[in-house]
Amino acid sequence: MMDKSAGINHSGTTVLNQSYNKSTHQAIVWRNVILFAYLHLAALYGALLIFTSAKIATTIFAIFMYQVSLIGITAGAHRLWSHRSYKAKWPLRVILMICNTVAFQNHVFEWSRDHRLHHKYSETNADPHNANRGFFFSHIGWLLCRKHPDIMDKGRGIDVKDLLADPIVAFQKKYYKFLMPMLCFIIPTLIPVYCWGESWSNSWFVAAMFRYTFSLNITWLVNSAAHMWGGRPYDRFINPAENITVALLALGEGWHNYHHVFPWDYKAAELGDYRLNITTAFIDFFAKIGWAYDLKTVSADTLRKRMERTGAEDKELPWGWDDKDLSLSDREAATIINKQG
Ligand SMILES: [Zn+2]
Ligand SMILES: [Zn+2]
């Protein structure tokens, strides 16, 4: 159970459980409301076309592009650039930048800056998608209104110099207005039309609109569902949770309790295999050929100690010294007076 009353958590940091201050007005951005309304209606129509008139090749292509775009977010903007959980040589960074541009979730610089804020000030007004404001806000609502002033305020204190020092990130930012429409909408619409004779309408609504809107919603589930539902074996004092459904859909990003405790782990998870963490399989593959290196992960000892300190409290309390439920760390840390033998 979450201890909402806690002022200090077991890691010694202050629990920032401030609720949303409704007096700070955040104006609705109607342009975004209209754009997202169109996107979702177009995606629904695309879903209908998948089952009525689109060629199977177009649907397979849309699924492939969904995976490509998500890798650009998970292995790229997230685990590489936001968290620096591994390093990548320039050919891999170029691949990840291209995949990331297909995803159109703003360029890597902006995504990573927002994401570092999300981790530093999780569930406060300075968190761009503060899950304390409910499912809708943390899912899509945060993109439909102006940012809370605390985001600008705390954002100034977040170090992002490393991001623009990467020429590939700087290149993407500089040419984003040209690269994004080409890679997210134009090329994915042209390929089905010219490669296997798909109609323009099927191509636009399935390979562009449906694929893009679906991938957005899957990514948003990490901010909404994985901040609400699931177990909390690593830190029961925070909202992020282990959500297997999100892990499956978001290529391994649903192990969110673990991820918020150890954001520098390139696997973003302890549990699950490659099926539930395709992003880790992707990074491991590139590590094998030498393009990904310095992969950071948590030692078994650190993990055990953290779980014993802040993990889920569902195990039985020990009855005394010889009970197997007495944790090893408690046993080792016990002071034994007048010890004999
Ligand atoms: Zn999160
Ligand atoms: Zn993260």
Image (cartoon, helix red, strand yellow):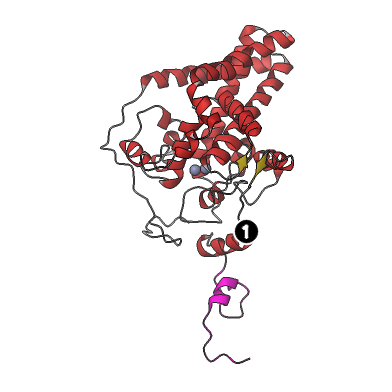
Q: Nearer the viewer, residue 174 or 240?
A: 174
* Amino acid on which the number 1 mark rests in the picture: Ser
Residue at position x 43%, y 37% from top?
Answer: 129
Residue 239 x/y as whole percent: 47, 49
Residue 97 lies in magenta, yes or no? no
Q: Is residue 271 left or right of residue 22?
A: right
Identify the magenta region.
315-341
**Crowding near the residue tagged with mark 1, few <14, some 14–19, many ≥20 C-alpha atoms within 10 Å:** few
Residue 87 x/y as whole percent: 61, 42
The quadrant holding residue 142 is top left
- The C terminus appears in which quarter of the rendering? bottom right
Q: Quick one: which residue is furthest to the left in this view?
A: 23
Q: Nearer the viewer, residue 45 or 130?
A: 130
Q: Which residue is mark 1?
A: 299
Magenta-drawn stretch, dominant element (helix, strand or loop) = loop
From this view, report whether residue 320 is shown above or below residue 193.
below
